[in-house]
Image (spheres, helix red, strand yellow):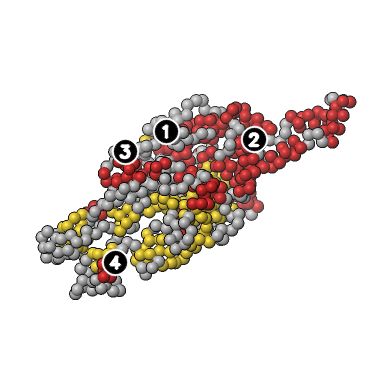
Amino acid sequence: MPKAFTRGQTQILFQHTPESIFHHDDFGLCKVTSIDLDPLDSGSLNETALYDTIAEMAAQWPENFRMNFPDIRDPARRSRHFRLGAPRTVNFEPFPENVQCQQCGYVTDYETARRRGSHLGRCPRKGCDGTMKQLRYVQAHNCGRLETLYLPKGRKCKRCGGTEMRLYDPGRTPLARWVCLNPACATPLQGLFQTPCTCKYSEASLAAGRPDSDRKMRVYPVAEPGLYNPLIATFINLQQGHEQRLTQVEDAETLLLARTWGVLAEPVLDVAQKRAEWEGQAGSTADRIIEALRALDPNHPEVLRHDAEKANPPGHAAINTVHHHLGALTGGVPGRKLIEHVTLRDNVTLTTPEAVATQLRRRGQTAQADRFLKDALDIMTRLGIAHAEAVENFPIAQAAFGYTRVTKKPKASMLNPFPADRSSDDPRSPIFALPTETEALWFQLDPLRVARWMTDNRLIHGAVPTDAVAAWAWLWRGALKTPRRDDGTLHPASAALQTLIHTISHVMAQRMEWSGYAISSIGEYLLPESLSFVLYANRFTESKIGGLLTLFEQRLPLWLREAAQQGRDCIYDPLCARDGGTCAGCLHREFNCTHFNGLLSRATLYGGPLPDGQDFGTRTITHGYWQDALLTPEDES
């Protein structure tokens, strides 16, 4: 009989989605069967952004590994296959169903134990009455299939003829064995059986010539990391209408690039409104008066002023600047991340180091303000960070949309939607969404430094640009405009750039102790098109702790300095550094990484060999992005 309990919404999202296994104080090991949904407030979630983000994540899986997952890019399929809501109540049932007596070691399943007269979780063997406890092992396959451990029932011991068994479990799965229960015999019967799985993943493994073991369900402890991996789509939850207006602006991509590159000083929608008003003046009464004046005196000051304004409409200079650097590479449909960057820039409350210094001076702390600003700008320059800003009202949303088994790696697992609620008449798969506003820190890299890093490591060939706008255009042409090949894989230069941004994000997130947040409570959001990333507090409550804002205002220079110094170390060095500088001891995160701990390497920051499989067009980074920024003993003193 299914049971139910309530948990915090974030806890449900990351730990209690359907098909996950957890330990319950009263019922032991259990599997989540479904989650009751509450409707979302109207307009609270940008559904277009949600589905686009899920589609981008799903595209990381090969086509035959995501065939269980409906094509979410098709609007007609969305409402037919998925239902949206906020998670409320968790429904579960005991799992797995194999039990072992803690006194005599007898192993069987629930049903057999009940038939033999077991009551109140006691061993049914005559004269024992020991406590029965669930076995901690299950069978799982990369396709998503999960089963209880296979029990070799009815197998007779060749030595004594007994049919009862126990599990010899030394703590390591490969060494576990079924053993005759007769204490005078204790003959090994067999190892843990691996059930064959006839699925699309097995077919692909067979076609690729992989080992036979890839086509079998393997035995795992229920607490094995990676046995179950919920997939969380994270996106900036902008107002859908605002986003649509940006895409409909004439010269949208050009204006968005101009705003991102610092060429356009005003918000894009404000400029678009002024351009519309300017175009609407054609043929107006004022125009007719000017033309009448022109007939009398072509050089009249008002005529000349009017002609100058006509030749330079709002935003025209910025558009010309972008066109000058990019030529025919402008005019396309702007990417989502570019829209998100500009919308954030134009709509959220931002705090800069200069603003912090101004606040300190207003409180009469002039010396402290000067020292803070000097130290902050100095370390930002050293680390190649052009902008650092605190965001008080960062609009973020997260949605759990599916899961994988055994591994998160898209090329080694199948993407599965959550199963439909068996107790409901609705056959659609659920998507659990949580929108909120939270505090965040936003960092943007220096395009000139990034361009120099790319050329120093021969990731892009050509002369290094001499100014920031030229550097932006150079990077846009070489790595940002079209980051992926036709087969969906990243071009080498784009992979290198995204790895650099992603690595810096992880290094800084791993050193959040001073904010008061645990590392697992810090999410990341990457905006590669603008060389930036956001670290945000993963809290879905009305109240805000303010830890990130406090960190920014009081410890920004020290935090950046410590991150750069400590980020080069790993407890598994020198082995980790030789293998590419990315592992669970340095950069990997258990939660909140949309790239599943891919596109990471400390080599991008400090130099060294790259991980196997990283396609940068080179196997070694000779010039780390932070290599010349390493602090000397004199700096530290």
Closer to the camera: disc 2 or disc 4?
A: 4
Residue at (54%, 46%) from the top-left corner?
Answer: 75
Q: Position of residue 160 (x, y in %)?
A: 11, 63
Discs 3, 4 touching: Cβ within 8 Å: no
On residue 520, the disc is none
Q: CA distance from mark 1 to mark 2?
A: 33 Å
Q: CA distance from mark 3 to mark 1?
A: 25 Å
Reading the image, the residue beneath label 4 is 110
Which badge, 3 or 1, is on the more N-terminal residue?
Answer: 3
Most foreground residue, 329 or 464: 329
Closer to the camera: disc 4 or disc 1?
A: 4
The residue type indicated by label 2 comes to Asp
The residue type indicated by label 3 comes to Ala
Q: Position of residue 55 (x, y in %)?
A: 49, 45
Reading the image, the residue beneath label 2 is 251
Picture layout, residue 397 above or below residue 383 = below
Which badge, 3 or 4, is on the more N-terminal residue?
Answer: 4
Closer to the camera: disc 1 or disc 2?
A: 2
Where disc 2 sits, the SS reads loop
Discs 2, 3 touching: Cβ within 8 Å: no
Residue at (78%, 34%) from the top-left corner?
Answer: 282
Q: CA distance from mark 3 to mark 4?
A: 40 Å
Q: Position of residue 117 (x, y in %)?
A: 25, 73
Reading the image, the residue beneath label 1 is 616
Discs 1, 2 touching: Cβ within 8 Å: no
Where disc 1 sits, the SS reads loop
Which badge, 1 or 2, is on the more N-terminal residue?
Answer: 2
Discs 4, 1 touching: Cβ within 8 Å: no
Within 10 Å of disc 3 (Cα), the crowding (few <14, some 14-19, many 20+) is few
Q: Residue furthest right?
A: 296
The residue type indicated by label 4 comes to Tyr
